Amino acid sequence: MVTTLRTRFFCSFVSSFGVIIFLLLYHLSHPAILYAKENFPCLRNTTTSDAIVIADQNGRVIFGKNDKKARVPASTLKILTALTALHHLGPSYKFKTEFYLDRDQNLKVKGYGDPLLVSEVWQDISHALAKRVQNINDLILDDTYFSGDIRIPGRGRSTNPYDAPVGGLCANFNTIFFERDPGGRIISAETQTPLTPLARKKIESLKSKRGRYTFTHGRGEAALYAGELLGHFLKENGVKIRGDIRLGLVRPEDRLIYTYHSRLTLEEALKKMLAFSNNFIANQILIALGARLFGPPGTLNKGVRVITDYVKKDLHLGDVQIVEGSGISRKNRLSALDMAVILKRFRPYRHLLKRKGTISYKTGSLKGIRTRAGYVDGGAEGVYSFVIFLNRSGTNIDALMECIRSYLT
């Protein structure tokens, strides 16, 4: 009987010990368990509505405040968009644009959502095409890789560059940069960019003196502007264009004569997106992802499906709400703890973020909202990650960030 009791006691002890070990391992691995017990000194000017997370180099949270409450991430959401693109496409992926000739000697351009087709690129493309064709009839633009009516939640119809529309075939981020000479005449503010007829017409309608503006929200105008730029550079390279510049479709019988692959890899494109917080690049990439994974035409719903599937299946986050990829919409919702999980996965790519001293970070800003997320190099202690979501007005986020940096280093 004594032996049986001892055996039962031993088994009970082993079982309890196993549970303790399991719970200890769970606490060590779960990103929301280990909180600093000391009074965190950086909270003097924060309120109960603010959300903050600081995690160590292993992703374990050492401080959290309101970390599970959903907040508007603003442009820090671009970190998630970048991470999703890197996951599906890989850092060395390059966007392409295709060029065809049809039986009537029309040159056709098929866009695939490349967000970085700037004037210098169109110059290079025209030089390459001039080696393959000397004269054409019409220049035909096919922008159908994206749906023709994509409306980004949070984006207005203003002329501000952050409201630039997306499209399957674009140029210069769908913006125009101009100024006026001493006589008041409109001139391009970029030596590499001519003022095409469409660009000049749109500028005149703005009645502005100078600056960079989004010039269109109409279907097809962005592609036509890209076509006018290409046409200008083709003529400079000696290619004769006898017909019109117009929208149209690439057909199966058309002959592919040239494929342009982006100068920049996806990783390099994302670095620019994050550095300049470019909404246009973010949503171009998101919608191109949707078209690639679920088939063209690319739509906002397909892009959102890609990012939400990644959030649920790969990051194992359940309550995140994403409606677009740039952070311009207030309908995007995730918690500071969710962002901490994203930062843990993004750690190998933290060099893509803007860096100031020992801090690599992405900011976010909407009216009444200030956010920041990134990493602090703690020296021998390793690299910490941090999330600050201030969904209200009045707090100096720079001072808060400096306090956190000083505390960690």
Image: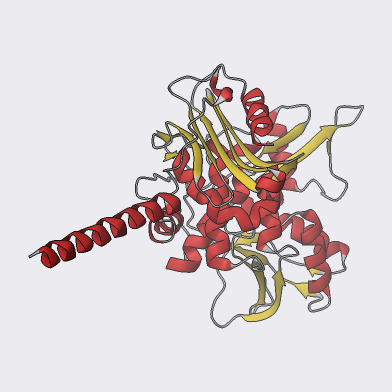
Q: Reply above or below: 210 against 135.
A: above
**What colour scheme does the image use?**
secondary structure
**Closer to the camera, 14 or 184?**
14
Residue 134 can be seen, yes or no: yes
Residue 224 can be seen, yes or no: no
In the picture, residue 76 is in which quadrant? top right
Q: Which residue is drawn at the image coordinates 68% and 56% (left, top)?
A: 269
Q: Can you give x and y, in whole percent of width and height, for residue 246 in the image?
A: 63, 60
Q: Which residue is drawn at the image coordinates 36% and 57% (left, top)?
A: 21
Q: Which residue is drawn at the image coordinates 58% and 24% (left, top)?
A: 42
Q: Reply above or below: 383 against 19.
A: above
In the picture, residue 25 is in which quadrant? bottom left
Residue 253 left/right relative to 182: left
Q: Reply above or below: 305 against 7.
A: above
The quadrant of the picture occupied by the C terminus is top right
Q: Can you give x and y, in whole percent of width and height, for residue 283 in the image?
A: 55, 50
The quadrant of the picture occupied by the N terminus is bottom left
**Closer to the camera, 292 or 103?**
292
Outermost residue toward the left?
1
Q: Can you give x and y, in whole percent of width and height, for residue 286 in the image?
A: 52, 55
Q: Can you give x and y, in whole percent of width and height, for residue 242 in the image?
A: 75, 67
Outermost residue toward the right?
182
**Closer to the camera, 339 or 34?**
34
Count every numbered label the image shows and give the total.
0
**Closer to the camera, 70 or 10?**
10
Residue 100 left/right relative to 67: right
